[in-house]
Image (spheres, rainbow, N blue to C red):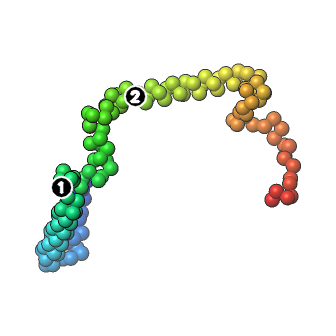
Amino acid sequence: MFNDIGPLELVTLVVLAVLVFGPDKLPKVIQDITRTIRKIREFSESAKQDIRTELGPEFKDFEFEDLNPKTFIRKQLDNEDLGLKEIRNGFDLKKEMAEVTDAVHSRESDSSSSSGSSSSSGGTVDMTKKPETPDERPPYDADAT
């Protein structure tokens, strides 16, 4: 439950609890907290049992941990029947990305070596180039605003 709390954080919490509740009331507070956690766990387990009985015998192997998306995906990826391991092992993302970047870089070098007009690049406009006449503004249209 508290896997991500380190020893320094734990000591800080204990010191803070002693300062807030005092050394006299601290054992009573700890008992109340543990009693509340125990009641919450009992309520959770009884709710799980009620759901299992309501689902019927078809879902006897149903686990609530499977509702966690990470657990569900991990179980499905480990399933041999789906053949996902072959797909996952056959797909090399780094290789695919390298091929895409090489294609993009070669296309950029081809367009920069061309004459620079939009008709020679197949009708595409290079958005990285600045306009040839930066001082010329487009006409103002009062009806459009």
Above or below, 86 relative to 11: above
Residue 122 seen by the camera: yes
- How crowded pointer 2 is (Cα within 10 Å; few <14, some 14-19, many 20+) is rated as few
Which is nearer the N-term, disc 2 or disc 1? 1
Given residues 106 and 67, the one toward you in this image is 67
Percent across and percent down for residue 82 are: 31, 35
Q: Where, quadrant-wise, is the C terminus in this rendering?
A: bottom right
Residue 51 appears in which quarter of the rendering? Answer: bottom left
Percent across and percent down for residue 111 are: 69, 25
Foreground disc of the pair 2, 1: 1
Given residues 6 and 54, the one toward you in this image is 54
Q: Where, quadrant-wise, is the N terminus in this rendering?
A: bottom left
Percent across and percent down for residue 49 are: 17, 63
The residue depicted at 18 percent of the width and 62 percent of the height is: 53
The residue depicted at 26 percent of the width and 33 percent of the height is: 80
Judge from the rendering whether residue 39 lies leftward or rightward of residue 131; answer left or right: left
Residue 44 seen by the camera: no
Judge from the rendering whether residue 121 lies leftward or rightward of residue 41; answer left or right: right
Given residues 124 and 117, the one toward you in this image is 124
For label 2, the residue is: 91
Judge from the rendering whether residue 124 lies leftward or rightward of residue 69; answer left or right: right
Q: Which mark is residue 57?
A: 1
